Image: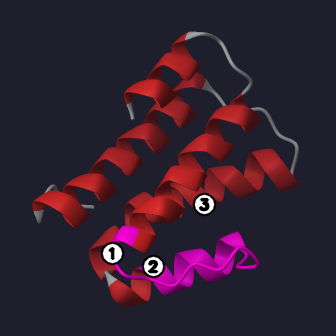
Amino acid sequence: VARIAAIIKGGARGQEVIAEIYLAARRMAIALGIAVPGSMTHREFLKRMTEKEPSLATSAGTITGLYEKAVFGHAPLSKEELSGSLKGLQKIIAIIFEGGGGA
């Protein structure tokens, strides 16, 4: 999370930042015991993650929605959107590893 925050602060393009956040969320899903094959689409990932842990729906939905917007829609992301997605990742980490934090 600290590395991603530094990337944001360093002025990286939104597409690069959200891709890093999305990949980190996929790694968290694996830590939760979710099978995440490389061929899984972002929408399949969201569905599988929220089926396993419904409390992650808001955070995971924010991340995958912004990932779709930036990567497939080629739309710029604001600093607020990137900050919100990073907060979503932090909530996912809290829920998976600390058993709390809300979604």
Q: Is residue 16 above or below residue 6?
A: below
Can the viewer see residue 70 in this picture? yes
User: Bounds of the magenta span?
Assistant: 31-49
Any magenta on residue 63?
no
- Give the mark count: 3
Which tag, 3 or 2, sits closer to the chain's start? Answer: 2
Mark 1 burial class by Cα count in 10 Å: few <14, some 14-19, many 20+: some
Question: Disc 1 versus disc 3: distance between alpha carbons?
Answer: 17 Å
- In this figure, which residue is indicated by the disc labeled 2? 49
Quick check: marks 1 and 2 in contact, CB under 8 Å?
Answer: yes
Residue type, mark 3 in image: Thr
Residue on which disc 3 sits: 64
Instruction: Judge the density around disc 2: few (<14), some (14-19), many (≥20) Cα neighbours within 10 Å.
Output: many
Q: Residue at x 38, y 26 (%)?
A: 2
Asked if 93 appears above or below 48 in the picture, the reply is above
The residue where tag 1 is placed is: 32
Q: Nearer the viewer, mark 1 or mark 3?
A: 1
Question: Which structural element holds mark 3?
Answer: helix
